[in-house]
Structures are given as structure tokens and as C-alpha cells.
Amino acid sequence: MSLKQWIQSFAVCLLAIVMLGANDVSGRFNRLGHEMICECGCGQILLECNHVGCPVSGPMIQELHQQLATGASDKGIMSWFANKYGATVLAAPLRGGFDDVAWITPYAVFILATLGTGVLVYFWKRRSGGNPPPVSNTGVLDMEHEAIRERIRRETEY
Amino acid sequence: MHVHPMPQFGSFTLLLALALSVYTLVAGAYALWRFKTTTVADGSGRLGETARRAGIASFIALSCAAFALVWAAFTNDYSVSYILHHTNRALNPAYKFSALWSGQEGSLLLWAWLLSGYGFVLRLRHKVDVRLSAFASTILAGIQVFFLLLLNFAAPPFAIQPGPIAQDGFGLNPLLQYPEMVMHPPLLYLGYVGFSVPFAFALGALMMRYPGEKWIHITRRWTMVTWLFLTVGIFMGAHWAYSVLGWGGYWGWDPVENASLMPWLTGTAFLHSVMMQEKRGMMKTWNVWLIFSTFMLTILGTLLTRSGIVSSVHAFAQSNIGDWFYAFILIVFAVCLFTFFKQKDHLKSENKLESLVSRESSFLFNNLVLLAACFTVLWGTLFPILSEYVQGSKVTVGAPFYNRVNIPVGLFLLFLTGIGPLLAWRSTSLRSIRRNFVLPGIAVVVAFVVLIIAGVRPWSAGDAMQATIFSLITFSLAAGVITAITAEFLRGAHVVRTQTGKNLLASAVLLVRRNTRRYGGYIVHFGIVVLFIGIAGGAFNQSHEQEMGFGDSTTMGPYKLVCQSFTQESKPNYDTEYALLDVYKHGKKITQLAPEKRFYLASQQSSTMVALHSTLESDLYVIYEGKNPDTGRPIIKVFLNPLINWIWIGVAIVVFGTFLALVPSLTKSARSQTALETPVVEAEVHHVA
């Protein structure tokens, strides 16, 4: 098996693991409950609201149980909550449309910045290739240059 | 008519500090503009010296103002509106002191005072470079003028409460009545404010076209100390959130938390990339903008915290002073931009990148990742405003967003933490890569396999599969990075042992003492790895909630909790309800926990006192949520948070490593220094060549 095949197999396994979806109700309840905000004004995640006698989180949790019992999809449940309480009930922008911009932008910026850095490095390398630094094969000149720099630095240091 | 001597004294000293700072700014700027030297003979020295001394005096004036406010808190002077709204008679004296930073006006006074304190040290040490210090002092005075204008005209801390003087105050926010709150805000502010100093030096060096990179040497300690304060401040805040807020976590991605994280990320990037300028004369423009951005992010963070433009649970200091900050940021940006374009030719790199596989490129990517993380945080913080503008409705951008976007970025950073120090400056040969990366590579694979065998299996983690995958990758990478760092220490110690004949431990100590900066940096990296391990433990958190009467029990992981009693008491400052829970592990009682709920009388607010049983393996975290009104029995929420302590230990290691890096190295001999500074890998490469 070649290295390429090993990498391909590993990637397929990793993807398979990532794509495997757990479908148990308690898991879904926990996950969805952590993707919503308690609307009592505390700004906490629904399942983490710890206010004594919070009048909102209890009924919201019950509603989440009811929605799960109807067999609705994750997206359907989130939409139901967003329609009832407004978009701020979702702990992250998940409604599609302009909300997607929130998710795409950081990745796009990161990819563009990486590409930009790559281009920058390429040009730097090309320029330094045209004007090679004064380094001999033994590195003697370079070491002398460094020694002078070090001496200047030392002598100008307070 | 009432006479209020101390508040009047405070107001007077604030006005005096403003006058002195304006003088430092105007006279200092004029002296620098009019004269090209700072010698006494041509008159500029005298003018500049008066500006410097006025700057020193402004620190004394601001110290008096801060003292006056603390005095008013301790003497229960409720004629002062700020004291009335943030303290009460029964408040613990330590918290009366912390009232200084518990509200808008007081925290602005703290900011101005710390800034003047930094300025005081800078002006005392002006001989390190008289002209550059004069530039930095003048720039700092400009920043100080802004804060003093705020304190004198927009948010005066000594404002007198109209009407008759109240007998008691409204009390301090209960969430702030916690020992860490006496330490966390000042440390955070020391970090925030401290970045003004490297900013002032960088801007000053650019304005005066400072020759060479000596200004970096001068500011290196300032930057590191500031970064250290900010790091400790942030994590002390995280620890406070963990211990007080009672939701089982330590970081909620609240805008105020984000505001502190952003300058930390850019400051960390600056600490790394500035080495490229120092060693190779590269990235000058980049570094200048990094430190400019870091400073502007501290101001932006303050704007976000105080203007109310984003919703935050830290709403204690919201007001209408946002416009002042908008104006200030614009002015700062304009000054930076103007100076940059005017002096752009001074920032030309002396060297170019010679190889993609080099220390320089690892710093480039490190910067890229840190800035990507910073952008994500900024984007997430500001997106609700953007969404409201575009769609007409606000959205919430909370933990699910940040976790999903930032975790891969964090993993890449962890990866770079390991490989960066193994790469040589300029270029690393393939042979040296093979030699240096084999052991860490093996460690990654072994850790991965061992963890799978030990039960960290994403495919059987159910709904936590994605989190388990990330944890698995984190733990494996951590093993690789720790191996790489250890190997670097051992290689260096081996070389020293060969030179000196000492044993390996003594050689390792000598190695560190000879180059504290390099090896202190490695220890910081090690601390970061430990911190990442702690964060990754969050994937395995468990929690559940139960109503518990006398004798009722619940289990959580290896622990069994039995309710012994529950009761309530009245204290001078608050009423309390708590439960006593015996904790058993493997059938043996190991401790008793008393989770508590307090109700503060003055402020009429309640607060959670978390009960913790903390071990290296996990934290048993118990909250008293209140009583069920129907049954009268307490509702107890129990969390099992694995590896949390690793986070605090990691931070302690980072602090130790930073202190070590601040200590001067043992020898000053340039040749021996260079020989030791050169990474062993590099030395070996040269040897091979």
C-alpha cells in the first residue's frame, strides 16, 4: 500500500467517523439545549441557566422535549423556537441566508490570508533568490556578518 | 449646605492631573517638534524636562484621586454617588477597596491611574534612551489626557449625590464579592493599559525614524510583563466565572470576555513576530501594525464593554460614553495611519524569507493563525450589530459559533507550538527535519493509539463524537509537542553536560540560566500545551440535576453524594441557604461539600457559591440551585468536569516560564551567548555543513 493510499484510507475513515450521526433523544436534547439561549435575559445557554425559579428556562426545556417527541428535525425544532422567541433564542446564527455569512467569513478570511501569506512567501523567496545573501558554502561570511551585527547590538545596548 | 472635603480633594486632583497631562503632551510635543535633540544646552532639554516632570506629577495627582475614592468607600461617604451605588456599610473591607473598579467611573479612574503609573516608571527610566522616551512619554500623555477628560467631564467618580445623604449604600454587585474579584480586574487592567507602553514606543520610534531595532530591546520587557498581566487577568477571570457564576463552565464567549481575548491574541502574535525584526530585521511594517492594532483593540474592547452596543452579561459599566471612545479610536487610527505613510520607507525589511521551512515562516503562520482567531472573535462579537443593520433583527453569536470556528484554528496553533521551535532561522535542512520530527511524530501516533485503546473513541461517544474527535487530536498533538520540547531541553542539556561534565539535571538548569529567554519561552509553550489539554477535557463533561432531601443520594462518575442536611442562616451582609453533602468515592467518605445560595440584603440580589472537590483528574462541581417551592427541598446540580485543573496549572506554568524569560541570562559574552542561543538543531546543521 502506497503512502497516498494510506492517506486516502485515513481520510475516508476520519470522514466516516465524523459523518456518523448519533440519533438518541437525550443526546439530541443535550445538543439542541446547548444551541439555544434562555430568554429570561440572563444570556446563558438554555441548559446552563441556573437562576432560582427562572420562569422561562423550565417551560422552554419542556417545549424542547415536546418538539423532540414530535419527531421534528433539528432544523425544524430550531426554526420553531426562532419563530416563537425571535432569532436571539439561537445561540449561533443558524437560520440560513445572511446568517451563513457569519460562518463563511472567518473561514474565507483564513483561507485568503493563508493564500496571501503563501504568495508573499513565494515573492520573498523569488526576490531573495535573485539576490542571494552573502553566505558562502561554509557559512564563514555569514557568521562574520552575524558577529558584526551582534557586536553593534552589544555596543549600542544600554 | 454639606461640605465634602475628600470628594472635593479628589475632584481637584483629577483636574490637576488633567492640567499636568495636557502640559506633558503640549510641551513635550513642542520640544520634540521644535528641537531635534534633547540636550539641555539648546533649551529643548529644559522644556522637555519640565514635560517629563509634569508627567511624573500627574501620577502623584492621580494617586491622590484614587486614594480619595478608596477613602470615601472606607468611610462610607454616601454623599458621593459612586460610593452610594457600589458599597454599603456591612461590606467586607477588601470589597470596599475593590469598589474602586466595580463601576464605570471608578474603573476609568483605575485605568487612568495605572496608565500614569506606567508613565511614571517610563519617565523615571528615561535615560535608557532620552529622546525615544520623550516621544513615548508624550504619546502616553496624549492617551492620559483622553481618560482624564472622560473622568473630569463625562464620568466623574466624585459626583455628589443630590438630596440628603443616605444612611447606607446600595451595595456591591454580589458577583463581585469574591476574593478573585479583588485581583482579577486590576490585573486585567494592568494588561490592557500596559499595551499603551509598547504602542507609545513603537509609534515614537516610527515618528523619530529610530535607527535599528534597539527600541524592541527597550520595550521587550514592557511587552512581556504586560502580556503576562493580561494572561493572568484573563484566566483569573475565567476561574472567577467558573467558581462564581455557577453554570459549570469558565468561558462563555461573552463580548466582554472577547474584548480581553482579542488584544491578547494580537499581543501574542506581536511577541512572536517581533523576534523576526529583532533577529533578522524583517516584518517591520507588520510589527508596527500589530502593536497599533493591539492597542486599538484594548480601546475597542473598552468601547464594547461600556457603550452597550453589544449585549453582555457584564453590564455593570454600561453608559453613554461610547461616543468618546469612537472619537478616540478614530484619532488614534488617523495618527497611526499618518505616521505610517509618512515614515513608510523607514520600515523596509533588511532581509527576505529564504525558505518556507524556517523559523521565520513558522512565525508567519503563527501570526496568521493568531490573527485568524482574533478576527473570528471580533467578527462574532460584531456580527449581531451587522445582522441588525442588514436584516433588521439581532442574532445571538454564542459559544456554539466560537467553538466550531476556533477549535480547528486552535489545533493548528498547537501544532505550530510544537514544530516552530524545532525549525532553524533562515532554512532547515531535510535531514534535520527528519531527525527532529521523528520522536514527536512517534509520540503523536503512540498517544493516538493509546487513547483509542483507553476508551477515547469518537465512534462510541454518541452525541459528543465531534468533541471527542477534537479532544483526541488535541491530546495526541499535545503528546507530540511535549516530546519535542523535552527533546530540545535534553539535547541542549546533553551539549552542556559534554562541555561542563555536570550531571544532566544540573546541565539542564545551567542551560536554562544561560539562555533564560529561549528556554523560558519553551516553558511557556509547555504551559500552553497543558492548558490545551485542560480545555480538551471539556469534551467529557457530565452534569445532572436532582432534588435532594435528607438522606437522598445521587451519583456522578465515581462519586456518590448523600444529602446530610440543608438549612438557612442570616449574616450581616447576606442571608444564606445551603446543603451539606457527604461525598463518597468507592464507598469511602472523602469530603463534605456545602453548596450555597446567598441573598445580599443591600443590593437585593442573589449569588451562587459553588462547592468544589478538585483533583488533577476532574472537578466535582456542585451548585445549590434553590428550593423547590412545592416540596421545600433543595435542588442540587452536579457537574463532573474532567481535567479542569490542568488549565490553571497550565497558566501557572506560563507565568513561571514568562518570569524565567524576563530574568537576565547568566552570561553576557556574545560569542558564548550566540553559541548557546543557536538551537542545537541549527548548530548541528552547521556542523554537518
Image (tube, grey):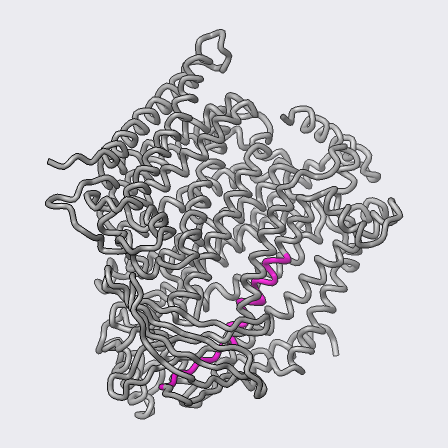
> Which corner quadrant of the image does residue A145 belong to?
top right
Q: Nearer the viewer, residue B269 or B219?
A: B219
**View extreme (top): residue:** B41
Question: x%, y% of residue B520?
Answer: 66, 48
Please say whether residue B532 is one of the residues in the magenta stretch: yes
Question: Magenta stretch mostly in which secondary structure?
Answer: helix
Is B610 rendered above or below residue B665?
A: below
Q: Which residue is depicted at the point 48% across and 15% down?
A: B36
Q: Nearer the viewer, residue B572 or A44?
A: B572
Could you tell me if residue B613 is visible in this image? yes
Q: Which residue is depicted at the point 76% across and 58% down?
A: B487
Q: Nearer the viewer, residue B470 or A98?
A: B470
Question: x%, y% of residue B118?
Answer: 45, 35
Stretch of the chain drawn in magenta: B526-547
Q: Where the C terminus of chain A falls, by quadrant?
A: top right
Is B29 rendered above or below residue B425?
A: above
Q: Which residue is depicted at the point 75% across and 79% down?
A: A1
Please say whether residue B597 is one of the residues in the magenta stretch: no
Is B128 rendered above or below residue B551?
A: above
Is B174 displayed left or right of B671 in the figure?
A: left
Q: How many numbered discs sit on the rendered protein?
A: 0
Could you tell me if residue B395 is visible in this image? no
Question: x%, y% of residue B315?
Answer: 28, 57
Question: x%, y% of residue B208?
Answer: 49, 24
